[in-house]
Amino acid sequence: MKAEDGQDGKVGGAATGLVARFSGDGGRANRINALMEATLVRGDQPLAEAIADASEPVPLETGEALITEKGHDTDLYFILAGKAGIIVKGVQVNERGPGDHVGEIAALDPTQQRSSTVVGQSPGVALRLPEPALTDIAERFPAIWRRLAIEQAKRLVQRNDLVRAANDQPIIFIISSVEALTVAQEIQSRLTHADMQVTLWTDGVFRASDYPIPALQRAIEASDFAIAVIDGDDTIVSRETTQLAPRDNVTFELGLFMGKLDLERTILVEPRNAQIKLASDLRGITTLTYRSGADDTLESRIQPVAHEISKHVRRVGVRCS
């Protein structure tokens, strides 16, 4: 992605021919007509003329930045043709097109850095209005301040739509190997009675027509916490030492949890004194252990683990983002 604070000297792109239609005295009428449709102008002919005379058409090229996040320029842009993506920290969060404006935050407050990157999605044209010119025009047409405020309020609502709603009650996702499934089921039963919504990997998470990783990602995205129940399912030899190790898929899924939910929201449950080999990168998370014993004592052996999980979940709380 080509990112520049300004557009000076940018020639030869697919949008160059479009720019010519809006340039100079010959393109003034086209600039005014396009601005009449802008949300900040709303058919105000004198305002459209003032902006047209104080601004400069610049190309909106596919894949190129009109505005760069954390930049220090303060120009306001009116998009006349084409589309642009709004990108925050590498993620596209919205799209703007003809009639829209971009760059208003830095234009309103020159002390602010650019809050997002604006990148062309199709060849087009934008009008660049310098911040001093905006201030001068607003003194003559003060209604533009109210329109800017209204648009800012609308965009705030759009931004809020992107914020993940907090769950009403903690949602917990549990993975395990088949061999450790009875332990996972007992934990699920205990936590469900503690007013928590608990999903086990066997509860229809992996549909027959689905791929495992996307299904896991959806489950993690919906969850506040993840629990990995591991056991010494396999025997491995490392540096001439034989050790017990969990199944590879459980280790992989545990890594996914840690990457998405962070250490505090990922809980590891393993048999006490089992000395299970786990990748060093996966250590450091909250780890709880249970005593080994006969199957008919499982409920009493898991009860302390479930109690500690419940306390931890209530202390940390549901995710807010």
Image (spheres, helix red, strand yellow):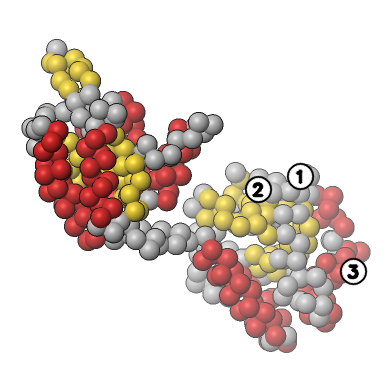
Q: Quadrant location of the N terminus?
A: top right
Q: CA distance from mark 3 to mark 2?
A: 27 Å
The three-letter amino acid code for the residue at tag 2 is Glu
Q: CA distance from mark 1 to mark 3?
A: 24 Å
Q: Say which mark, if any, is on residue 29.
A: 3
Say which of 141 and 314 sits in front.
Answer: 314
The three-letter amino acid code for the residue at tag 1 is Gly
* Residue beneath the point at 48% across and 61% down: 163
Labelled pair 1, 3 in contact (Cβ < 8 Å): no
Which residue is the extreme one toward the top?
240
Q: Earlier in the sequence, mark 1 or mark 3?
A: 1
Q: Which residue is mark 1?
A: 13
Classify mark 3: helix, strand or loop: helix
> Would you call the spot at circle 1 few (<14 residues within 10 Å), some (14-19), or many (20 or more)?
few
Q: Quadrant location of the C terminus?
A: bottom left
Query: Residue 101: image x %, image y %?
Result: 68, 66
* Residue beneath the point at 61% across and 45% down: 2
Labelled pair 3, 2 in contact (Cβ < 8 Å): no
Up-down: is 112 above or below 318?
Answer: below
* Residue beneath the point at 24% across and 60% down: 314
Q: Earlier in the sequence, mark 3 or mark 2?
A: 3
- Quadrant of the rendered structure where residue 156 is? bottom right
Up-down: is 60 above or below 13?
Answer: below
Classify mark 2: helix, strand or loop: strand
> Would you call the spot at circle 2 few (<14 residues within 10 Å), some (14-19), or many (20 or more)?
many
- Quadrant of the rendered structure where residue 217 is? top left
Q: Which residue is mark 2?
A: 64
